[in-house]
Amino acid sequence: MTSTQKVPALWIILAIAAISLIWGSSFILVKKSLSTYSAMEVGALRIASAALFFCPFFFKRRKFIQKQHWPSFLLAGLTGNLFPAILFSIAGEHLPSALSGMLNAFTPLFTLIIGVVLFQQKFVLKQTGGIILGLIGCIGLLVAGKSFSFQFNYHALWVILATFLYGINLHTVKSKFADLHPLTSTAGVFMMIGPLALGLLTYSGFFNRPWSDHAKMWPLLAAIALGLFGSAIAMVLFNQLIKWTSAIVASSVTYLIPIVAVAWGLFDGETIYWSQIVFMFILLWGVYQVNNSKS
């Protein structure tokens, strides 16, 4: 443990398990929300719910926010939250939730590539093998089908674009918010994109829907849960986990999220091919090799 704060190992294990469960379950929640609402509505409702959650934190911590932080809040909010939320929802209209969860594991590789290309991050030659493995796993997931009968699934590119934006977001947060407490910066981010999400909900006609249909309540609750748990509470837990341990230890959730997503997909009766499972583990092994070669 790199932190000087002594934290029981059980707390760390429980935090990792909780974060993995929440983020791994987000893909099935997207699927359930899409049974009633459009991709734009699901993504916007997710962000609006998280923004409401962070309102009290923002008003308590706004005094620590400087004028130069606001443009970075907007960039981080768009690349790390609003756009990916909508992109994952668009993908969810066409892809099994389990496959979206598998492809989400590509985020650490994009984070490395973007860091090297755009942020002058040091590149370790030993990471090359992990990147190649990750790319093989990702491409395999794009084309994998029954009995390795390959067919390109272009809808999966929405997820790849979302993970690319996640990579930009992670470096933006690291480079622009070093002087802010994570809760302060996260609250500021959601205050910037919350009004945009409300605007999208208004434009989509979400507030004009009849609310007397109880059959629509579960999809609504699923979308709200995405925001409260997936975009808000899990982020607070993740930041706390990094504070307790290190970014490397916290990154272990990367390997658990796809497994949780696959479990939910199987439970929901989705068709998952062995070829997809194989390429998922190739991708995760590549991510592991990259993380293991950082020093």
Image (cartoon, rainbow, N blue to C red):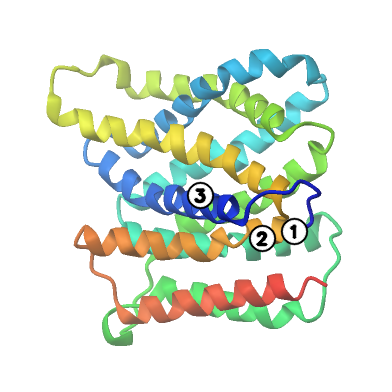
Separation of residues labelled 2 and 3 (CA atoms): 13 Å
Separation of residues labelled 3 and 1 (CA atoms): 19 Å
Which residue corresponds to mark 3?
Answer: 19
Residue 270: x, y in percent?
Answer: 23, 63
> Looking at the picture, which amino acid does disc 1 mark?
Met
In the rendered structure, find residue 1 and report the number of the disc placed on it. 1
Which residue corresponds to mark 2?
Answer: 249
Mark 2 vs 3, N-terminal side: 3
Which residue is found at the position 22% from the left and 33% from the top?
218
> Looking at the picture, which amino acid does disc 3 mark?
Ile
Tell me whether the residue at label 2 lies in contact with that at label 3, contact meaning CB atoms closer than 8 angstroms.
Answer: no
- Which quadrant is home to the N terminus? bottom right
Left or right of residue 43: residue 113 = right
Residue 264: x, y in percent?
Answer: 30, 58
Residue 242 vs residue 193, the one in the foreground:
242
Residue 204: x, y in percent?
Answer: 35, 25
Mark 3 vs 1, N-terminal side: 1
Left or right of residue 59: residue 153 = left
Mark 1 vs 2, N-terminal side: 1
Q: Give the structural element (helix, strand or loop) at label 2.
A: helix
Q: Determine the image quadrant of residue 76.
A: top right
In the rendered structure, find residue 28 and report the number of the disc placed on it. none
Which residue is found at the position 22% from the left and 35% from the top?
36
Q: Determine the image quadrant of residue 10.
A: bottom right
Tell me whether the residue at label 1 lies in contact with that at label 2, contact meaning CB atoms closer than 8 angstroms.
Answer: yes
